[in-house]
Image (cartoon, grey):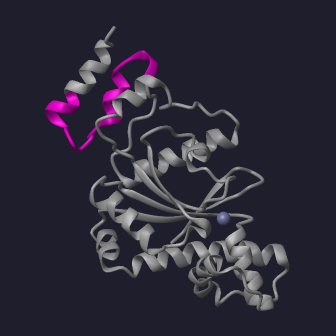
Amino acid sequence: MTNPLITRRRWLLSTCCAGLGIAIGKAAETIGSDIIDTEPYPSNANEALVRLKNGNQRFVDDKPRHAHENPSWRSLLIESQKPFATVVGCSDSRVPPELIFDVGFGDLFTIRLAGNIIAEDVIGSLQYAVAHLHTPLVVIMGHEGCGAVAATVEEILHKTKERKHIESLIKSIKPGLQKLDLKLEHDTLMRSAVEANVRWSMRELLALPEAKLAVKEKRVTLIGAIYELNTGRVRFLDL
Ligand SMILES: [Zn+2]
C-alpha cells in the first residue's frame, strides 16, 4: 500500500522543489512518524555546524540515534538530495563521517581520499557540492594516526621513498609540513603534522579563485577539523 505521507512528500518535491531537493529535512519533520526529526534541518553554515557538533556529541556519548536510515527516509531521497554539509576526509576505515557525526542518508556529501588532500578530482567534487548542491558548509577533516601524514613525516625525517602512486599523495601533503618542528617528540610531532595538513588543505582550497570568492561572498563556510581516534571527538579548528 502506498504511504500517503511519502506520496505527499513526493508531491511537495515535484511541485515546488523539483530538482533542487529543497527542505527535505523540514518536510520530514512533519511527515511520517517513522522519520520524525527532532532537530530542524540546517539552512545555513552555522546551523549545519551545530548539527555536526550535536551528532558528534551523541557519537562520543555512545548514544547515536541513527536517524535518516530507514526505507521511508531513503525513499524521500530518490528524486533529489540536499546534503547540509560537505566533508573532505581521509579514506581511513576508522574515520567514516556519517558515523562520527551520527547522520544518515542524504545528510552529507563526502569526499574521501588518503590524507584528505585537495587533489584535482577532489576539487571537481567540491565544485559540484557547492555549485549544484549548495551545501553551505565545507569541513576539511583530518584525523589522528593518519597513515598518509605519517608516511610524509617519515619521508621528511629519513628521506624514505614510497611506491609511485603513494608518493603522489605524499607530494601533495609535504608542502604543508615544511614548517613543522622536527625536533618535537614523536606523538606531538604527528599531532602537529595532522593539523598542519588540514590547514594546508584549507589554504590550497582557498587559493582557488572560485573557492575564495564563494567563501568571501559567504555562500560557503570553510572549516577545519581533527578527529580524535581515542575519544571519538571531532575538534574543530579556529581559522
Ligand atoms: Zn588518514
The answer to whether 7 is drawn above or below residue 189 in the figure is above
Q: Seen from this angle, which residue lies furthest left?
A: 15
Which region is colored magenta? 12-35
Is residue 90 or residue 36 the one in the foreground? 90
Q: Residue at x 47, y 79 (%)?
A: 203
Q: Quick check: 33 left or right of 88?
A: left
Would you identify the image quadrant in which residue 155 lies? bottom right
> Would you identify the image quadrant in which residue 181 lies?
bottom right
Q: Is residue 21 magenta?
A: yes
Q: Which residue occupies the foreground of this view, 158 or 131?
A: 158
Residue 62 location, quadrant: top right
Q: Quadrant of the N terminus?
A: top left
Q: Position of residue 212 (x, y in %)?
A: 34, 76
Q: Position of residue 56 (x, y in %)?
A: 60, 46
Task: Give the tally of numbered discs.
Answer: 0
- In-image side of 156 versus 32 (left or right): right
Q: Quadrant of ligand 1?
A: bottom right
Query: Residue 226, how many percent across, how many down?
Result: 63, 62
Outermost residue on the right side: it is 185
Report if residue 165 is visible in the image. yes
- Residue at the spot 35% in from the left edge and 54% down from the top edge: 135
Can see residue 182?
Answer: no
